[in-house]
Amino acid sequence: MHLAFARLHWSPAVFWSATLAELQAAFVPVRPPAFARRQLTGLMERFPDAQPSTESGND
């Protein structure tokens, strides 16, 4: 209740009339979905790390 009143500035009427879905949406932080392994692999193939050159460039 403290979170609803202090941070969300809800009135008692709003708090007590909220549905469970509304309470969950208000209080549970939203996390972005994690990369699937195939998505990560695809990005690694498209954007590989640069490999250091073994050539001296003084031919």
Image (tube, rainbow, N blue to C red):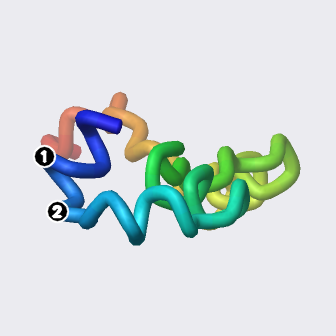
Residue to which mark 2 is pinned: 9
**Element at label 2:** loop
Residue 2, quarter of picture: top left
Quadrant of the rendered structure where residue 55 is?
top left
Q: Give the structural element (helix, strand or loop) at label 1.
A: helix
Decide: is 36 above or below 55: below
Residue 34: numbered disc: none
Other-residue count near label 1 (Cα within 10 Å), few / some / many at <14 / 14–19 / ≥20: few
Report the residue that reaches farthest toward the front: 13
Circle on res. 6: 1
Residue 31: x and y in percent read 54, 48
Query: Height in image: 17 above or below 1?
Result: below
Establish if 51 lies above or below 23: above
Q: Nearer the viewer, residue 41 or 17?
A: 17
- Asked if the residue under mark 1 is in contact with the one under mark 2, i.e. CB atoms within 8 Å, the reply is yes
In the shown orientation, is residue 56 left or right of residue 44? left
For the C terminus, the image quarter is top left
Report x, y in % for residue 4. Answer: 30, 49
Q: In which quarter of the image is residue 46?
A: bottom right
* Residue at horizontal 25 percent and vertical 65 percent from the top: 11
Q: Which of 46 and 20 is in front in this view?
A: 20
Q: Distance between the residues labelled 2 and 1?
A: 6 Å
Which residue is depicted at the point 20% across and 34% down?
56
Q: Residue drawn 67% across and 45% down? A: 34
Residue flagged by tag 2: what amino acid is it?
His
Depth check: give the residue in front, 41 or 29.
Answer: 29
